[in-house]
Image (spheres, grey):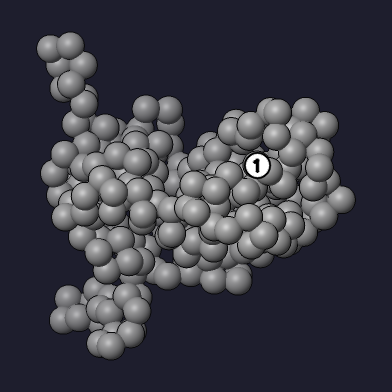
Amino acid sequence: MTAGPDGARANAPGGPPADVIVLDAVTRVFQVGDSEVRALDGVSLSVRRGESVALMGPSGSGKSTLLNVLGCLDTPTSGRYVLDGEAVEKLSEDQLADVRQRKIGFVFQAYHLVARMSAARNVELPMIFAGVPPAERRQRAQEALTSVGLAHRLTHRPDQLSGGERQRVAIARATAMRPSILLADEPTGNLDTKAGDEILGLLERLNAEGLTLVIVTHDPNVGRRAGRLLRMRDGRLVEEP
């Protein structure tokens, strides 16, 4: 990695981009009746490959909107987003879906597990949509659940699991497609302190193994444990020292 004339990071020629996420003056404006709501207001941000970043801020500050933009679930009204060297605004809907499938894992506060399915089957879901052959997806689901400490819970449904175990299943599902980026929206928000610490430890281990991690949180403890803490206020990003 080299530095440009203004001191900003520059990607090394011939190698993978040092910055896997680059936002340049991104805005997201919603029309609400006769009014415009500026959920993102000129956000510029770069995240290095393998970095751990926490986003904090009050409700309505733009954190979830920013996470949706980063995950290609929403598109900016203006500005530029480059994801792993690709200009997102130039991608078609099919290409965006492919990027989400290959490069990005999502973890949510509410887990979003299918109640009638076993833990293993929940982990298999994204691989089913991606067309992974049955034998391979069963093996990868088992490996993913084993990696989060749930080898003994493969056949259990969500209602047979604790909150911490459900979130572990959600993390296994998010990583089964072997993404390079994990986006987590309040991943400890529904958990007690012990379970929350265990989930944070798991996310930190995945990050140490090379996964780029962006976490939205209200919890100062989560923010402190990230490699970099950013705060959102009125749709703008403020980096903490």
Residue 190: x and y in percent read 66, 31
Q: Does 69 appear above or below 175?
A: above
Judge left or right: residue 206 versus residue 20. Answer: right
Residue 99 at least partly seen: yes
Which type of secondary structure does the marked residue at label 1 adopt? helix
Report the number of numbered marks. Answer: 1
Residue at 36 percent across and 56 percent down: it is: 99
Q: Which residue is mark 1?
A: 122
Judge left or right: residue 123 versus residue 42. Answer: right
Judge by depth and name the residue closer to the eye, 102 or 224.
Answer: 102
Residue at 54 percent across and 71 percent down: it is: 210
Q: Amino acid at mark 1?
A: Asn
Judge left or right: residue 175 versus residue 17. Answer: right
Q: Does 7 appear above or below 109?
A: below
Q: Does 195 appear above or below 127?
A: above
Q: Does 217 appear above or below 174?
A: above
Q: Quadrant of residue 137?
A: bottom right
Q: Considering the image in quadrants, where does the N terminus appear?
A: bottom left
Residue 176: x and y in percent read 59, 57
Judge left or right: residue 35 versus residue 182. Answer: left
